[in-house]
Image (cartoon, grey):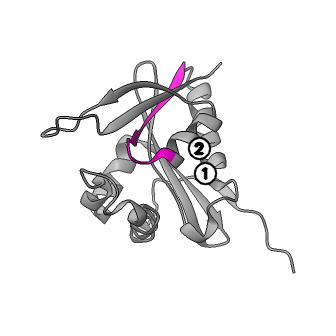
Amino acid sequence: MEQPPVSITQIPADFGRWGDVLALIMHAFAFMDGIIDPPSSAHLLTVEALRAKALRETGFLALDGDRIVGCVFALEKAEGLYVGKLAVAPDRQGQGIGRRLMQAAEDLARSRGKADIELETRIELAANHAAFARLGFRETERTVHEGYDRPTSITMRKTIS
């Protein structure tokens, strides 16, 4: 029997599965450990921090039935949206879920009259740079985390119409 397709939905105000979202993010970001320096800010997340993030930002979930297989958060800024914590379950990567989550963020930006979407990715994550480039993002700057003397992050932006 064929399973229903993954659905993308905005995180509701009364959402109660923050532990599941945190577990997804930690699992999806685990490959970065030992690769990126400084370590991912995902290590600072807690259930309470995610709950607070959802009060400031719009979150989207990718659901396969009841299973959370992806998420992304979008922070509204003056000109556009800042997108962060895009995560897809490792066993579901390569199936277009990340693309669909980013499309939900782009649709949100468009509905709010925003000119662009911006994100940051780490210098070491060349595969992420390429994936975001395929989605229409272009590098706009390189930034340095506090205490480092070299660029540690790449800012990428996509102009939307």
Rate crowding at label 2 as few (under 14), some (14 to 19) or many (20 or more) other CA atoms within 10 Å. few
Quadrant of the frame with the N terminus: bottom right
Q: Residue at x 62, y 30 (%)?
A: 136
Task: Tell me the kind of residue under disc 2.
Answer: Ala
State yes or no: residue 124 in magenta: yes
* Numbered badge on residue 145: none
Q: Image height check: is 2 above or below 111?
A: below
Please identify, in this view, whether the residue under mark 1 or under mark 2 is nearer the observer.
Answer: 2
**Which three-letter amino acid code belongs to the residue tagged 1?**
Gly
Instruction: Say which mark, if any, is on residue 131.
Output: 2
| Foreground pick, 32 / 19 | 32
Q: Name the residue under label 1.
A: 98
Residue drawn at point x = 45 percent, y = 18 percent: 79
Distance (Cα) linking label 1 and label 2: 10 Å
Q: In which quarter of the image is residue 78?
A: top left
The C terminus lies in quadrant: top right
Q: In this figure, what is the number of numbered marks?
A: 2
Q: Which residue is drawn at 48% across and 45% down?
A: 126
CB contact under 8 Å: marks 1 and 2: yes
Q: Earlier in the sequence, mark 1 or mark 2?
A: 1
Q: In which quarter of the image is residue 91?
A: bottom right
Q: What stretch is highlighted in magenta?
A: 114-126
Q: For the point 28% across and 34% down, which residue is it?
A: 151
* Spot occupied by residue 60 in the image (x, y as percentages of width and height): 54, 50
Vertical side of 133 occupied by 41: above or below: below
Considering every residue shown, the one lying at the far bottom of the view is 1
